[in-house]
Every structure is written in C-alpha cells, then in structure tokens.
Amino acid sequence: MDISEIKRFLGQDWTDTETLIRRSLDSDIGLLNSTNRALLANGGKQLRPILGLLVARACGGGSVAGDSIRFAAASELMHNATLLHDDVADSSKERRGRPTVMSILGGPASVLIGDFWLVRAVECILSAENRTGEVIRIFSKTLSDLAEGEMLQLEKADSGDTDERDYCKIIYSKTASLFEAVCVSCALSVDACQEWVEAVREYSVALGMAFQIRDDMFDYSDEASVIGKPVGIDLDEQKITMPLLGALSSVDAGKAAQIRSKVVAIHGNPSLKDEVRSFVLENGGLEYSKARLSEYVAAAERALDALPPSEEKELLAGIASFTASRNR
C-alpha cells in the first residue's frame, strides 16, 4: 500500500492537517525552528493522522469537521513528542535511518523539544469547537498509558521476566493507545453514533497491537535496515518482545530461564545478543509472532463491518492488511 496515494486521496483534508502541524511548530527560537523543520522533513509514515482523517470521513459521510483536522494534527505532534522523549529513555542514537536529536543536541534538548511538540498538540485539542473536554480526557489517558508503558518496560528490562500479558500491556500503552485516541476522537468530531465509535475503537486498538508486533519482528530480521532500525536494538535495550516470547514458549522452563538470564546480561556481554537472536530464529519466534499478528489484523478487519460502505472504509481495511506484510 502506498501511503502517499492515501494522502492524495485525502486531498485538501490532508493539506490542511499538514499545514496545521507545520504552523503549530513555529517558534522565534532559531535552533528550535531548524530542528523542527528537520524532524518534519524526516517525519515517517504519518499514519496516525491519516487514520484519523479516514475514520472521520468513514463516519461522516465522506466529510470531516474542523475538529477532525485538529485532532489528527494533535496525534502526529504527540507521537513525535513521545519519540523525542523515548530516544532519551533508550539512549537511541538513530531513528528512521538518521541521527536522533539526542545524539546531536543531547538528552536535555531532546526532552525540551519533545515538550514543545507535546504542548502544541494540547493547543490543537484546546482549539476544538466541540467535545474539547472529552477529547482532552482521551488524549490525557493516552499520555498516562505511554508513561506507564515505558516504566513497565524499564522495570521488566531489569528483571527479565516479561510474559505475554506484560508485553501486550506495554505495546497497548506505547502504541495502540494513541491509535485509539486519534481514531475515537476523529469519530466523535463528526458525531458518529456509539456503535460506530466502538467499532472504530476496536479497529484502532487491534491495528495498533498488530503494528507494534510487526515492528518488533524487524529486530530479528535483516529487514530492519530497510526501516532505519538497526538489527537487535531491542535486545541491546534488554526488551523481551513477541518473537522472543514465542520462541520461549516452545522450550522447557530450564532452557527459557537460561535465555532470559542472557537477555538480562547483554549489557555486560554484548556477544550474548547473537545467541539470543539465533535462539529466536531457530525456535519459531517469527512464525509465532506472525500468527499473533494475523489474529490482530483479522480483529481489526472484523471491527470495520459495523461501518457503512465507503472508499475510506476500504482504505482502513487495506491499512490493516498492509500492517501484516509491511517492510517499512
């Protein structure tokens, strides 16, 4: 699926969203302005605002409201704010194939720029004409989820005892929650009925879970270089993700404990990373992940059945299908 084609399909709605994002980041501070421009130029897929606009049009008879644009823009600003903060938490030197703000300007600057993007996201929501309080609560929950997910992930990196329930909580909190926030908010912006709002919620959560599982699979695949993510970066950060959980489920408790101890010890002995990666590839970790990914994609597609027929609905289904096979 070509994301640029979807942007062209969205037409003026997409142009208005991009314009709002860009204007929201204007600053009199030269360094801040130049950094923001560089981040926008290397902005990734911009999937969250695309989803929000498609949902608004699918639920609004092909049209969006002004608030749909505001909420879509807010989601992209908030997403990038969390990446700027996440790079500091993870000491990440590279993102999307380029050096991070943290690696160039340092951790304090990355946090401050992330704060700036976050405040501008909140301003977009506060400028809404309707449902401002309701949507603020939706996005506030997402920010709380993000913080809790990050802290749970840090806690589990030290203990090495992440199980699939922990993992699903982490990826819901860090990824699916923001998918949910923008899609539900954009449905509300066009006064969608409760049935459609709930369908959109189910779709977005399942899609977000699938999206993150696919992303985590790249860490054990040579495809990682295609999306600008070094192979094994999750293991460097002692993260136990779905591919490793799948491989662990195929061996006895003793062997699983040995592998978990190696993950915890990677910081002191980086060569252990290759052992763990080989273990995952040899014990069906990617196949297990693909099966779980397919379950979430199917759930996302089923959720769309409640929405009326439209080209936007078909594109939402196409994005779910694309998530299962994407290589970037």
Image: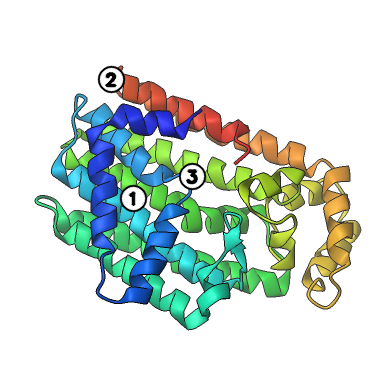
The three-letter amino acid code for the residue at tag 3 is: Gly
Q: Residues within 10 Å of mark 3 (few under 14, many from 20)?
A: many
Q: Position of residue 131 (x, y in %)?
A: 14, 51
Q: Position of residue 23 (x, y in %)?
A: 23, 58
Asked if residue 162 is positioned above or below residue 209 in the image, the reply reads below
The three-letter amino acid code for the residue at tag 2 is: Pro
Residue shown at 44%/26% (left/top)?
317
Q: Which mark is residue 308?
A: 2
Q: How far is mark 2 from mark 3, CA to CA?
A: 22 Å
Question: Label 3: which residue?
Answer: 208
Residue closest to the far bottom? 108
7 relative to 264 in the view: left or right: left
73 relative to 276 in the view: left or right: left
Total residue callouts: 3
Q: Quadrant of residue 17?
A: top left
Asked if residue 275 is positioned above or below residue 262 in the image, the reply reads above
Q: Earlier in the sequence, mark 1 or mark 2?
A: 1
Q: Is residue 195 among what the camera can see?
A: no
Question: Label 1: which residue?
Answer: 181
Residue shown at 19%/24% (left/top)?
61
